[in-house]
Amino acid sequence: MKLYFVRHGHMEEARQKTTVPDNGPVDEPLDYQGLLQAEAVSKELKDVDFDYMISSPLKRAHQTAEIINENHNLKIVIENDLRERETGKYVTLEVWNELFNFDSNFLPENTEPLKDFFDRVYTSIDKLKKQYQNKTVLVVSHGGVHQALYAYVNKV
């Protein structure tokens, strides 16, 4: 199996606001810069012969996948377990960064524990490996998911 991972493009939320909503994950579309980033990665991947394309359900990831898919015409499979870590409350960007400080084990109220988040991502990757053996797969997701993937691959 060849597995390609792409992080979604930039979104306005990350630049303009210091909080995420208290009723679920940040689910903003790409901004202009993010659209350009998605188009650039689409050009980089245009000659890769993907068998499947998988996306997080969040708008920014799915929109990035759609732009990449303009060169591939595949059905984009939504994988809910590859969404970003849940926070459940308003969180400043500084707190968001602290959520991925693996030494602190920082856990604000209603936040998905890091171990649970990593287990969710690991289970999803294991499922992909079984389901798409001998295939070339593109996954479009999030920075936190990529940190979990790094730990998975390096057995950290």
Image (cartoon, grey):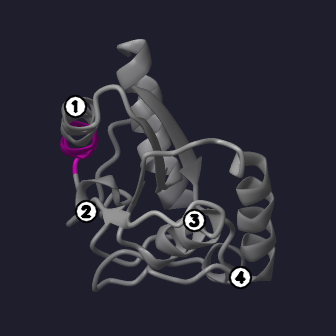
**Circle 3 residue:** 69
Quick one: 130 or 31, which is closer to the camera? 130
- Residue 25 lies, in percent from the top left, at 36, 74
The N terminus lies in quadrant:
top left
Res. 83 image quadrant: bottom left
The three-letter code of the residue at mark 2 reads Asn
Sequence-wise first label, 1 or 2: 2
Report how far apart the C-alphas of labels 3 and 1 lie in the structure.
24 Å
Report how far apart the C-alphas of labels 2 and 3 lie in the structure.
19 Å
Dot 4: element: loop
Dot 1: element: helix
The residues colored magenta run 113-121
Q: Residue at x 55, y 75 (%)?
A: 63
Q: Nearer the viewer, mark 1 or mark 4?
A: 1
Q: Residue at x 76, y 66 (%)?
A: 39
**Circle 1 residue:** 126
- Residue 76 lies, in percent from the top left, at 40, 65
Res. 58 image quadrant: bottom left
Q: Residues within 10 Å of mark 1 (few under 14, many from 20)?
A: few
**Circle 2 residue:** 80
**Circle 4 residue:** 31
Q: Is residue 47 above or below residue 68?
A: above
Q: Nearer the viewer, mark 3 or mark 1?
A: 3
Quick one: 106 or 45, which is closer to the camera? 45
Assign the magenta stretch its main secondary structure: helix
- Residue 73 lies, in percent from the top left, at 53, 67
